[in-house]
Amino acid sequence: MLAVEPTRYCVSKHPIPQPIDVKSPSLEEAELLAMLVDKSVCHGDFTLASGAQSDLYVDAKLTTSDPRAALLVGRVGWELVKETATARNTHVDSIGGLTMGADWMALSIGIAAHLDSPESDIKTFSVRKSAKKHGRHKLIEGNFSEGDSVVVVDDVITTGGSTLQAIDAIETAGGKIAFVIVLVDRQEGGSEQIEKRGYQVVPIFTREHLTGADAPRRSHISVA
């Protein structure tokens, strides 16, 4: 998504977080949500990539590119991939999506998969917005093979356009879509458009998590 000349405010940093409890996925999810709200949630007047106006902008890349948050994205995302794949009785070969929203997220989940199970053969890749103009003229970069069962990831879903663009590219290249994992579903119709194509969308968080009564408390006062 792209914000154009917004009037906005974003929240400032929380105190230094405590060490991650690797035995408690629920605590990891709570910490990830706090970091996402702290780093990425902005309120104001925004124009989104779809052209729609919104009072909420989620600059998710500030979270997915943060090393500590990326660790949490990987662990929480990988647990969700395993849980969903088991429920659907589906094997997963690779994880990827449209650049740039999917890039850091896919790699974080892939790393978490290998830390969880060193013998894992999970691969990650990135779908370009257009094919490369030189070299091998690739549309899909990284470790993707024809016939792969793919988990498509995205950082934010609004209309679903970027996720569907990735799905189209993957299917054209011979991949099979297992399901979709998204960091934030803005709940503005995008997931429904993807599910109309027959693909389950599993969000880690929704707009309600970011703005509802249970959203982490936030402060505009920086903590030294």
Image: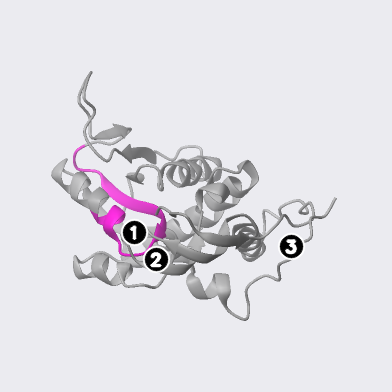
Q: Earlier in the sequence, mark 1 or mark 3?
A: 1
The residue type indicated by label 3 comes to His
> In this figure, which colouring scheme has been used for the structure?
one colour
The label on residue 143 is none
Q: Where is residue 8 drawn, in percent x and y? A: 57, 61
Q: Which residue is mark 1?
A: 180
Q: Regarding mark 3 in the picture, which secondary structure is present there?
A: loop
Q: Regarding mark 2 in the picture, which secondary structure is present there?
A: strand
Residue beneath the point at 47% across and 42% down: 104
Q: Is residue 17 above or below residue 199?
A: above
Label 3 crowding class (10 Å Cα cut-off): few <14, some 14-19, many 20+?
few
| The quadrant where residue 144 appears | top left
| The quadrant where residue 222 appears | bottom right
Q: Is residue 29 above or below residue 188?
A: above
**Is residue 214 in view?**
yes
Please identify, in this view, whether the residue under mark 1 or under mark 3 is nearer the observer: 3
Q: Which residue is mark 3?
A: 220
The residue type indicated by label 2 comes to Val
Q: Where is residue 181 drawn, in percent x and y? A: 39, 58
